[in-house]
Amino acid sequence: MEGHIPAFQANSRQKFFGLALLSAGIATACFAQWTLPLPITQPDFWNIRNWWLNFGNKSSPLTGLMLYVLASWIFVWGLSLVGKTPTLMVFSNKQLATHSPRFGFWITSLGLAALNASTAARDDANSYGPALAVTWIISIVLFMVSVMRAENWRAPSAEKMGKWFHAHRVELLVVGIIIIAAFLIRFQDVELHPYSFINDEGQMGNNGACIVGGSCPNLFDLGWAGQPMLAFVPTGISIAIFGHTATAVRLVSVITGTLAVLATYLFTREVFGQTEAWMAAGLLAALPFNVHFSRIGVDNIVDSLSTTVILWLLYRGMRRGSWWSFLTAGILGGLCMATYPGTRLASIFGVFYIGYIALQTRGFLKAQARNITIFILALTVTAAPIIGFFYTHPDTFAARMNREGIFQNQIFQNELANGNSAFEILTGQFMKSSLVYILTPAPSNFFNSPQPYLPAAAAIFFMLGMAYTLWRIREARYLTIFLWFWAAIILGSTITGGPPTSQRMLMSTPALAIITAIGFSKIIEIIPQKKQFTRWIGIILPLAFVLFIGFQNLSYYFGEYRTGHYFEDPTNELTYETAALITPLHTNGRFYLIATPDVPYLSFDNFNFFSPDVEKNYFNEVSSQTLAALPKNKDALFIATADRKIDIERLAQLIPGGQWNEVLRRNQPDQVLFYSYNVRQSVLQTFKP
């Protein structure tokens, strides 16, 4: 009939229009990214007032950002016409079977937890260190046994496990390849890239060695950077196995970063789907931002693991009614209280999402009440000693934020006094913290990258993925990754000094990879899956995307980033390279440093980590009188920084017969790093002024 369109024609026209919109959205996003590469080095770029004045040219990012907004709207509109019908995640509200209470182990465990908290809060807690550690472990084990007995847990049979492995053999193979690749990317040449071993890594090593050596018996006392000594146990174990080496300290980060890739797969697989899962894991495996911090021996990288694995366990528990998942999440959440301060957010996120889902799902809270109780009690039992310590030392709990927060350290107030408005200050802080993902470099804060975190192709689909996430924001899983990503940016960098603070935004990296995977996977959804050919396209396209982005990232990090010497610093190189000469002295020699007095070299922990038993002193005034005053019952190693060459040459003239050495910078051999002069005890004893 005239004026009526058959249904199949209407659907065809709708799909054609939707595909056109999708194509237009992606094209607009590409154009938006193209407009963003700006001359960031210009001094007034971060003057927010000029952005509107320069709107339309490449001295303002507003043009590109607004084009991204337009691209996002077009992209989501197109998906709404041709994409799959969104499915809602279902959470378990099935009433769990009740069991008769068994109070014995519960009471014992909670009683020990209370004892641990009160002991850790004492001023003389260090004298109870070993006993406190033992009772803490016993309290956790008893709590686990209590839950397993209450739930009538039985180990799965070998036959059942065999069937599970057989059914998932292909997926396990894919995951295994990704994890092995992630490990090798992080472990290859780890001792020399990034170069060199920085003094904060020496701090980590010294704290780990202190535990292994028995000098730090209280695991809940504060160590470096205001963290409980418990945080340094993995480093201590590594040092006990591999010795006082750079590899021993960095290996902990390598393993943590690799596990973060696995956790990203597990979370995404549970919450979004298999395609998104292996894409997100593959993207994170080669992300330079994450790879870099997985290769240096500071514990910031744990942020990318803790949040991911706790959220995976909680979502798994809430979907399946799994008490085991809640129990494990609680224990890990308690351990997070002892690690890097930002990691403490992981438990807070978990509690928030449980509450949000409880409000959205009728009957959920009643059905999951016992599991939620298990989670909270497990967290409390595990964190009890740390909670007790922080209760009596509240200033130490907030010490890091008091030192770094712009409101606490007066940075915000000083900017106000200089005539900047609160809006300008906070907008500038936010833009510096967020544009680094797609546009601006990360010039400091342990990374020093001249490029943004994401290459252009990944940035495009990250922005489109963020648009889709916002479109579905009312759903718990999308709200989760949205808040997960932005909380790290706002709390870790926007309200702290010196943004972008890369070391404090690592929590965002799994969410970053997941959002990027979501953006690209939505294109795959529109490909029909009825034919074998199109099904293969649905596999090849995301694989090609992940491999292409991975190739770009690894070429940059192991190529330009390394050869550009962006991470190198002569001070760190000095404390690292001199170890080869200082360590062999042991107790048979003394080390004397001739250096600029303005730099407190000998306070840097690398010297103590690599050479803990060598006596170290300054020797900045070289003369016959000062040489005569030196003790002569041991060998003497003199090391001078490059600017003190004249002094060490004079020393060699006054005491001939020593061994002279000139050491060049490892990666910049056109520059001298230091000079050394080794004098044997017998030669030193013959010196007469």
Image (cartoon, rainbow, N blue to C red):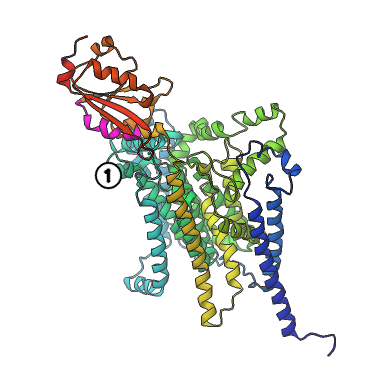
Q: Is residue 171 above or below residue 433?
A: below
Q: Position of residue 267 (x, y in %)?
A: 50, 60
**Could you say which is closer to the camera, residue 131 or residue 49?**
49
Q: The residue under label 1 is which amino acid type? A: Phe
Q: Position of residue 199 (x, y in %)?
A: 39, 34
Q: Position of residue 500 (x, y in %)?
A: 57, 41
- Taking the spot 72% from the left edge, 29% from the top edge, the residue there is 419
- Taking the spot 53% from the left edge, 57% from the top edge, the residue there is 513
Q: Which residue is mark 1?
A: 242
Q: Residue reaching furthest right?
A: 2
Q: Residue reaching furthest front?
A: 670
Regarding mark 1 in the picture, which secondary structure is present there? helix
Q: Main secondary structure of the magenta part?
A: helix
Picture quadrant of residue 9: bottom right
Residue 464 visible? The answer is: yes
Picture quadrant of residue 686: top left
Q: Position of residue 600 (x, y in %)?
A: 40, 24
- Which residues are the magenta region? 575-588
**Could you say which is closer to the camera, residue 559 or residue 321?**
559
**Could you say which is closer to the camera, residue 205 or residue 329?**
205
652 left or right of 681? right
Picture quadrant of residue 297: top left
Q: Is residue 472 magenta?
A: no
Q: Is residue 584 magenta?
A: yes
